[in-house]
């Protein structure tokens, strides 16, 4: 989005709109996670003060939707792993349930940095871009005679 006109030209109107929907949808789902995560406590029988004034009918519908969504996400993850012939990873699929709290933390950190440090970019070093390994990168990428 540094050059929105360029992005619009590259993606076209439909792609530009989908890009923004996906970006904002991902961010808002992570930002909303703290509102949804207490439903985990409810699903194991804990009573939470936050839900005391919610009608039982609405709360049951909310819990049903929450549990159905979690099951759907696990099933879709299993299908994706089977489709890519990665069924050995199925045992790790339940770990996906901690992904949202971690993503939520990252979303709130990014939101804070957007306003508190707007010119700061929290970068992660990745393999071939890592300065620590520049000598090895040069050796591997130099043309051999």
Image (cartoon, rainbow, N blue to C red):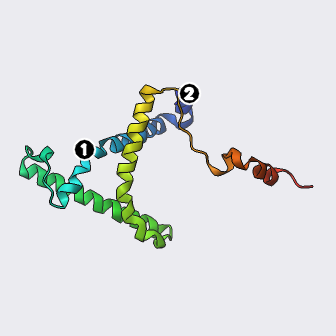
Q: Which mark is residue 21?
A: none
Task: Measure how far apart labels 2 and 1 are at the Cα level.
Answer: 34 Å
Q: Quadrant of the C terminus?
A: bottom right
Residue 139 located left or right of residue 27: right
Of residue 12 and residue 33, the one placed in the foreground of this image is 33
Residue 48, horizontal then vertical, whole percent:
14, 50
Residue 46, horizontal then vertical, whole percent:
15, 57
Residue 92, horizontal then vertical, whole percent:
42, 67
Residue 103, horizontal then vertical, whole percent:
40, 47
Q: Is residue 143 visible?
A: yes
SS type, badge 2: loop
Q: Which mark is residue 35?
A: 1
Residue 34 located left or right of residue 11: left
Quarter of image, res 44: bottom left
Dot 2 corresponds to which residue?
A: 3
144, above or below 24, in the image: below
Residue located 36% across and 56% down the image: 98
Residue located 48% across and 26% down the image: 118
SS type, badge 1: helix
Furthest-right residue in view?
145
Residue 15 located left or right of residue 35: right
10, above or below 55, in the image: above
Quarter of image, res 113: top left
Nearer the N terminus, badge 2 or badge 1? 2
Question: Label 2: how many residues lie within 10 Å, few (<14), some (14-19) or many (20+)?
Answer: few
């Amino acid at each position: 989005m540094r050059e929105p006109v360029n992005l619009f030209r590259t993606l076209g109107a439909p792609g530009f709109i989908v890009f923004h929907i996906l970006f904002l949808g991902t961010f808002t789902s992570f930002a909303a996670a703290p509102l949804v995560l207490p439903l985990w406590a409810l699903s194991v029988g804990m009573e939470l003060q936050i839900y005391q004034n919610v009608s039982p009918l609405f709360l049951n519908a909310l819990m049903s939707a929450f549990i159905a969504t979690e099951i759907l996400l696990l099933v879709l993850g299993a299908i994706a792993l089977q489709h890519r012939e990665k069924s050995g990873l199925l045992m790790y699929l339940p770990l996906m349930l901690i992904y949202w709290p971690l993503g939520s933390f990252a979303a709130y950190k990014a939101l804070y940095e957007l306003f508190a440090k707007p010119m700061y970019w929290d970068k992660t070093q990745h393999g071939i871009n890592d300065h620590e390994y520049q000598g090895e990168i040069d050796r591997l990428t130099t043309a051999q005679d």
